C-alpha cells in the first residue's frame, strides 16, 4: 500500500508539495519541454577518481543522474555517497556484492539487498527506494523480497556496454545517439571504464546536452519519499514551511538537494528562494 502510494506521489511530487506550501506553480510556458533522459551509473562508488570525474561532467551540463551502488563499494568509499547526493543525484541499490540474485537462496537475496541499504544509510544516505538487479537478473522471488524492503526494480532501455573492453568509444556514442524521451541509459562508474566510457560520454554530452533534460529516476527519487511523509501527515495536521524544512533536515536533505531532486527544477528553485527569503 505504501509502495503504491509512493509511486503515485512520486509521479506528482510538485503538485502536492506546492499546494501544501501555498505557493503558486510557475506557468506552463516556463516548464522545460525537452525530452527527458535518465542516465544511470552502476557498480560504484569508485575508490579512485571516476565518481568525481563523472560528477564533474554531469555538473558541467546541469545533468542529474542515478547511481546504483553496491554495499561493498559504499563501505570502501562512503564519502562518495555524500558527494553524489550533494550534487543533486539519486541513489539506488545494486546489492551488496553484485550478486546474481536469481541463483541464490531467499535468505541471501534478502541479505544482499538489505546490506546495501544499510551501507548507504550508514554512509549518510537516505533510505533507498529502488534497486537494479546485477546483470538484470531478476524473477518473482527476487521482486517479492525487494518489495518487502520497499525497493522498486529498475532495469534500462539502452545498454552502452561500456563495461566491455572491446566496446569502442564510437559504439558508446552510437548507443547514446539512440536516446529518446524516457530512455534509461545504462553506464558504469568504476576504474576499468575510466578512459573510454568517460571520454565517450563527455564527447557525447558536449554535442547533445542541449537536446535533453537529464533527470533522476522517479522510482529512486528521495524527493518522492519526503512528499510521501509530508502528505500522510498533512491529512491530520497542517504544517508550515518551517516544519516541512525540519522534516527535510531529518531526511538529511539540504535545499540544494531538494532543488536537485525535484522533477520540476525551476519551480522548486522558486520554492527554495521563498524559503530562504523568510
Ligand atoms: Zn552491475
Image: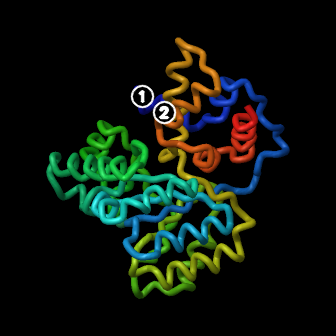
Mark 1, Cα crowd under 10 Å, few <14 / some 14-19 / many 20+, is few
Question: Does residue 62 lie above or below 225 as drawn?
Answer: below
Residue 195 position, x and y percent, is 49, 85
Residue 187 position in % (x across, y down)? 48, 69
Query: Residue at horizontal 69%, vertical 76%?
Result: 206
Q: Nearer the viewer, residue 237 or 2?
A: 237
Q: Decide which of 212, 236 is in the foreground and name it.
A: 236
Q: Establish if 28 lies above or below 22.
A: below
Task: Tell whether label 2 touches label 1 (CB within 8 Å).
Answer: yes
Q: Position of residue 172 (x, y in %)?
A: 54, 78
**Residue 165 sits in which quadrant?**
bottom left
Asked if one can make out residue 127 in the rendered structure from this viewpoint, the answer is: yes
The residue beneath circle 1 is: 2
Residue at the image position 39 percent from the left and 81 percent from the top: 192
Residue carrying label 2: 6
Q: Is residue 165 above or below residue 268?
A: below
Rendered position, 59 above or below 106: below
**The N terminus, quarter of image:** top left
Amino acid at each position: 500500500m505504501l509502495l503504491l502510494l509512493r509511486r503515485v506521489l512520486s509521479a506528482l511530487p510538485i503538485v502536492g508539495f506546492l499546494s501544501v506550501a501555498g505557493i503558486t506553480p510557475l506557468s506552463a510556458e516556463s516548464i522545460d519541454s525537452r525530452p527527458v533522459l535518465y542516465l544511470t551509473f552502476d557498480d560504484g562508488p569508485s575508490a579512485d577518481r571516476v565518481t568525481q570525474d563523472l560528477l564533474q561532467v554531469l555538473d558541467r551540463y546541469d545533468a542529474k543522474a542515478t547511481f546504483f551502488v553496491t554495499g561493498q563499494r559504499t563501505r570502501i568509499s562512503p564519502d562518495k555517497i555524500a558527494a553524489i547526493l550533494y550534487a543533486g543525484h539519486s541513489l539506488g541499490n545494486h546489492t551488496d556484492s553484485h550478486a546474481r540474485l536469481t541463483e541464490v537462496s531467499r535468505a541471501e537475496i534478502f541479505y544482499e539487498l538489505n546490506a546495501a541499504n544499510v551501507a548507504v544509510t550508514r554512509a549518510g544516505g537516505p533510505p533507498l527506494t529502488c534497486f537494479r538487479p546485477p546483470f538484470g537478473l531478476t524473477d518473482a522471488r527476487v521482486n517479492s523480497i525487494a518489495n518487502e524492503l520497499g525497493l522498486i526494480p529498475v532495469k534500462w532501455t539502452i545498454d552502452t556496454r561500456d563495461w566491455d573492453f572491446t566496446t569502442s568509444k564510437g559504439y558508446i556514442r552510437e548507443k547514446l545517439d539512440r536516446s529518446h524521451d524516457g530512455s534509461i541509459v545504462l553506464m558504469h562508474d568504476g576504474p576499468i571504464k575510466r578512459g573510454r566510457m568517460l571520454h565517450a560520454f563527455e564527447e557525447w554530452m558536449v554535442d547533445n546536452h542541449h537536446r535533453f533534460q537529464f533527470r533522476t529516476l522517479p522510482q529512486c527519487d528521495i524527493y518522492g519519499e519526503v512528499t510521501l511523509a509530508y502528505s500522510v501527515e498533512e491529512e491530520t495536521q497542517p504544517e508550515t514551511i518551517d516544519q516541512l524544512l525540519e522534516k527535510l533536515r531529518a531526511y538529511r536533505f539540504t535545499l540544494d538537494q531538494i532543488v536537485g531532486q525535484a522533477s520540476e527544477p525551476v519551480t522548486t528553485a522558486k520554492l527554495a528562494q521563498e524559503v530562504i527569503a523568510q
